[in-house]
Image: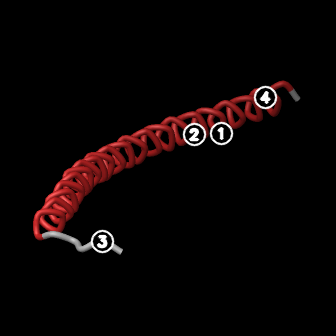
Amino acid sequence: MGDISNRDIMQAITELGQQVSGLANRMEKIETRVSDLEIEVKRAGNELKQDIRKLDAKFSVLSDSVVETKADMKLLKQNQH
């Protein structure tokens, strides 16, 4: 078994340092991406809430209109008899 020189140890440390630095870089990019996705999900959620409110309002108007039309039809039928 051969002796390990200080140079070999330093080279291994340098390589490990580079790998750790690369991993830290990748981790930072992942964190940025996750933050961006969180913002996008919040925005999409807000848009969805607005769309649901608008749809609810339209349904209410339509429902009121249907009830009014049915009432008019009932009155017309009563007047015919």
Q: CA distance from mark 4 to mark 1?
A: 18 Å
In primary-sequence order, the first of circles 3 and 1 is 3
Q: Secondary structure at mark 1?
A: helix
Amino acid type at circle 2 is Asp
Q: Is residue 53 above or below residue 18?
A: above
Sort mark 3 into few (<14), some (14-19) or many (20+) by Cα contacts within 10 Å. Answer: few
Horizontal and vertical percent for residue 30?
A: 29, 51
Q: Which mark is residue 79?
A: 4
Residue depicted at x 11% and y 63%? 7
Which residue was labeled with disc 2? 64
Q: CA distance from mark 2 to mark 1?
A: 5 Å
Q: Is residue 77 above or below residue 32?
A: above
Q: CA distance from mark 2 to mark 4?
A: 23 Å
Residue depicted at x 40% and y 48%? 49
Q: Which mark is residue 67?
A: 1
In primary-sequence order, the first of circles 2 and 4 is 2
Which residue was labeled with disc 3? 2
Q: Secondary structure at mark 3?
A: loop
Sort mark 1 into few (<14), some (14-19) or many (20+) by Cα contacts within 10 Å. Answer: few
